Image (cartoon, rainbow, N blue to C red):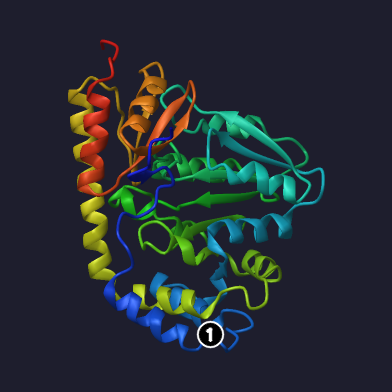
Amino acid sequence: MSIPVVHQLALNESPYPPLPSVRRAMRRAVAQAHRYPQFYPDDLTERIAVWCRVAPDHVAVGSGSVGVALQLLQAVMEPGDTMVYAWRSFDAYPLLADMVGARPVPVPLSPDGHQDLGALLAAFDHRTRVVVLCNPHNPTGTLVTTDRLAAFLRQVPRDVTVLLDEAYVEFAGGSVPDPLALLDAHPNLLVLRTFSKAYGLAALRVGYGLGAPGLIGRIRRRQLPFGINTVAAAAVKASLRAGSELRRRVETVIAERERLRRELGALGWHIGPGHANSVWLAAPDPIDDGAVALTDAGVLARHYPGEGLRLTVGSREANDAVLAALAGVGVRCP
């Protein structure tokens, strides 16, 4: 008999539904569902550009950040080219490489869960066209510092595009480097962001990329006509107007993340600093036993057998359920 899932903590979703003002905007947009959305999302692109304090020709909007990533690969890669990325990472990256006929080149993380920038550079060959960095990293939550990012970008050849995935940037509390200051110096850099995580609009599928006009123009040529629906566009615009309320939600998630880290540490789990909306438990701690205990408690987490457990920061009730379940799992001594 299967155990019902009470707390879904596997996909790094927000524990909160859209804000009331956002839901009102969505309901108004639903009334126009018999009308097509804009052929291309020009209005939304301009709103995001103003919000990010860049010109509109620095912004590409797509179906979630993964949609923008696919548009990038379609724009800069040919069959047989290679895409280098740290592994483990976001599961979609090898799938996207396969979709464009590229060869994925996974590079192991360092033992402490960081992306090994030197090893990524060493994995380049003459067919490398894209290298992926996640900052903060998924699933470990580790961070690439400003100095390390700047040094890395200086070493990447100009014919290799750096896909800097910042899906969790809002949860880093100001620790993430400001990549916008790097765009002018690095026309091969695309900064990828999403409204799925901090803004709680995962089901609506809106993401965007920031880059130099030349690269953005190539990405936009792969834009799917009518690809951003009216309800999603209305929700994003309303979210941009609700910045202070959303920041308070993010602060609550960060506070709960740090509470989880402290209390799991007190239980004996070995947890490094994390900067996403999740907590990473790694082997050799008993993560496989932990996954069983969580399942038995009705908690659905992301389990990588033999590697680690990624726990999305949920509501306080959900986080308490995590702590109760993992309290009974024996953990190695320091």
Q: Nearer the viewer, residue 224 or 142?
A: 224
Vertical placement of 224 versus 131: above or below?
below
On the rendered structure, is 261 left or right of 172?
Answer: left
Check disc 1 and report its element: helix, strand or loop.
Answer: loop
Residue hosting label 1: 33
Q: Look at 69% across and 67% down and name the residue there.
A: 218
Q: Tell me if residue 185 can be seen.
A: no
Q: Look at 55% across and 30% down and name the residue there.
A: 118
Q: Position of residue 177 (x, y in %)?
A: 39, 50
Specify few, some or many for label 1: CA neighbours under 10 Å numbering under 14, 14-19, or 20 or more. few
Badge 1 amino acid: Ala
On the rendered structure, is 330 left or right of 13?
Answer: left
Vertical placement of 238 versus 248: above or below?
below
- Quarter occupied by the N terminus: top left
On the rendered structure, is 154 left or right of 96?
Answer: left
Q: Nearer the viewer, residue 11 or 98?
A: 11
